[in-house]
Image (tube, rainbow, N blue to C red):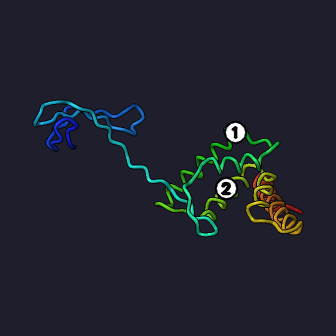
Amino acid sequence: MRCPYCKTDDDRVANSRANSDGTCVKRRRECARCGRRYTTYERVEERPLRVIKKDGNRENFTRKKIVDGLVKACFKRPPSMDQLNAVVDEIERELNERFETEVPSKEIGELVMARLRELDQVAFIRFASVYREFKDVSDFVEQAGMVLRETRAESGAQRQQSTGTPDSQ
């Protein structure tokens, strides 16, 4: 580290201490040439995630866009803002684990749809209609039918597990 006073790059670390959440290390340094002390901060370099849009353009990942999409899909629906923020936290964590620097927008949309499908099926259909660009009512009916079939299959499996006998539907 170069001394801010005499510009020499010969110093020693006199004291180091991490901040309370462990995201930063504060170091007190002493210049070997002039003897003056100064403070430096060391942080993990944040690598911004870039989103590759359908048209090939790239833009910085914005958490707010996901939140806005979820809020619109869940308008007048039961999920709370805390639940939506938890969903966005999960999505953001998964994106950072799976992708180094760039993520296709399709991946983000699919993650949002998967979480919405578990959280609220009506919100899922709303989001899917925009995300998948439904052209007419048949697209909407087809997607709703898939959700309905999955829901019936899941409830049938749950009944079978609780009674121990095959469902008679």
Q: Residues within 10 Å of mark 1 (few under 14, many from 20)?
A: few
Q: Residues within 10 Å of mark 2 (few under 14, many from 20)?
A: many
Residue positioned 29% across, 37% down in the render: 40
Left or right: where 53 falls relative to 145: left
Which residue appears farthest toward the left when viewing the image?
Answer: 33
Residue positioned 77% across, 58% down in the render: 154
Up/down of 90 relative to 38, above or below: below
| Element assignment for label 1 | helix
- In the picture, the quarter occupied by the C terminus is bottom right
Rendered image: mark on residue 65:
none
Q: Amino acid at mark 1?
A: Met
Residue positioned 51% across, 60% down in the render: 98
Up/down of 46 relative to 25, above or below: below
Residue 94's quadrant in the figure?
A: bottom right
Q: Which residue is mark 2?
A: 112
Label 1 to label 2: alpha-carbon separation: 15 Å
Nearer to us in this view, 97 or 131: 131
Q: Residue 134 at what x, y percent from top left?
A: 81, 66
Q: Which residue is mark 1?
A: 81
